[in-house]
Amino acid sequence: MKNHINIVSPEEAVKCVKSNQRVFVHGSAATPTVLLHALEKRKNELKNVEVVSITTLGEMPLTHESCKGSFYLNSLFVSQNIRNAVNSDQGGYVPVFLSEIGRLFRQNIMPLDVAFINVSPPDQHGYCSLGTSVDVARPAVDTSQIVIAQINKQMPRTMGDGQIHVSKINAAILVDEPLPEVNYSNKLQEADFKIGKYIAELIDDRSTLQLGIGGIPDAVLKSLTSHKDLGIHTEMFSDGVIDLLESGAITNKYKIKHPGKIVSSFVIGTKKLYDSIHDNPAYSFHEAAYVNDTAVIRKNPKVISINSCLEIDLTGQVCADSIGSYQYSGVGGQMDFIRGAALSDGGKPIMALRATTNKGQSKIVPFLKQGAGVVTTRAHVHYVVTEYGTAYLYGKNLCQRAHELKNIAAPQHQEDLDRAIFERFGNFIYPLS
């Protein structure tokens, strides 16, 4: 294999993109910002370029009004920077499990013409690292006709399956810029800490944790410092894992898959996190098809899956990706881990949410909003936790579930929910425990 890299300018690098092609964009903290801005400058030359990605961070220049007709954001997960475009004629959303996105590429259901990636500088053997985001970037690199790399001196080198030999890279640009940072701890509210304590009570020593995105997972981690021999097998994590690892609560000692290592497919956090994972064999990053495979997840003991949602109805149907018909985020890996945890020996799938929205509306509702998507079915939901307590739904009928969920709703909304329960089920008397 040749170790020569074709180093070019950003403008030269993006010339490979042609009209009517499909371009993959590396996601999360690995978003290749310089390449995206260079591609945006070609908007007057290009037509109908389909751009696919999961979460991206920072500005997305391809969503500008002036890019309409040139670029179409066909997203596999909707992040804040493309939300307006996806809910207009400038974009669309593909509902798909995170574990199956690689299959779209590998089976030519969504064949890729070009992949834009953000990688570490090559080592002495000519291998770059996909760094903070291996997830679906690995299958994108493996299957794309052309690979364009943004080689970033500040991209951490991660262990696992994210190594890319320079011979696979058709052209590259050199950059030296910090990765985008997100600090979820700064956004924690009192309700999050209450939820964290309730969830911590459900977690036994030697459990294996999966953590969704946002403040609640970090609040949970802050409540686990007295736990022992915890393990991590998760699609993503942020800074909270570092503090818990340093406290000694995380040892990964009792995991069946990759004992002694934290397993993930991507990270989003601060520079402290990015520095921690750099060249660190305590972390192992893999393709999402592996990390999120229920057959892999269930092998670990006592898997605790912690995810959140936008609203949940009184029967346990979970909407996590849309507000009515407005596409807000995506399916992601929630169902992968909810199911994996349920099948694990001693596992517990947990849905965690603040009881109300920022506007004070109840997130526990009689019916989901019209047009809302059900990401997690009521048959998959076991535990639901708010700042007002824990509801256990598994094995309970619809009326029992409704009462359980009403009891952990915000007090000011419980009377309305009681009325909805009566209208639906009448004076149905059945043991509620």
Image (tube, rainbow, N blue to C red):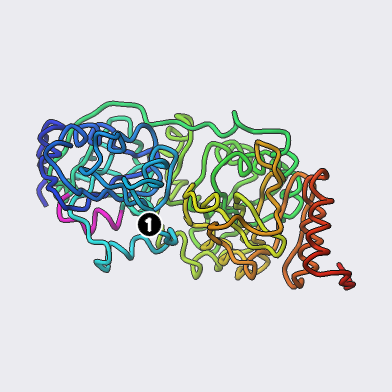
Residue 50, above or below 124: below
Position of residue 88 measured from the top left corner of the image (x, y, whole percent)? 37, 46
- Displayed quadrant of residue 214: top right
Secondary structure character of the magenta stretch overall: helix
In this rendering, position of residue 380 left or right of residue 69: right
In this rendering, position of residue 188 left or right of residue 58: right
- Considering depth in this image, is 267 or 43 the residue closer to the camera? 43
Position of residue 349 measured from the top left corner of the image (x, y, whole percent)? 64, 61
Circle 1 packing at 10 Å, graded few (<14), some (14-19), many (20+), is: many
Residue 272, above or below 192: above
Q: Quadrant of the C terminus?
A: bottom right
In this rendering, position of residue 279 left or right of residue 167: right
Position of residue 429 measured from the top left corner of the image (x, y, whole percent)? 90, 72
Looking at the image, which residue is at 56% across and 53% down?
320
Q: Which residues are magenta?
A: 138-146
Looking at the image, which residue is at 82% across and 54% down?
407
- Displayed quadrant of residue 368: bottom right
- Displayed quadrant of residue 406: bottom right
Looking at the image, which residue is at 85% across and 69% down?
426
Residue 342, above or below 325: below
The residue indicated by pointer 1 is 287
Q: Is residue 356 a member of the stretch shown in magenta?
A: no
Residue 156, above or below 315: above
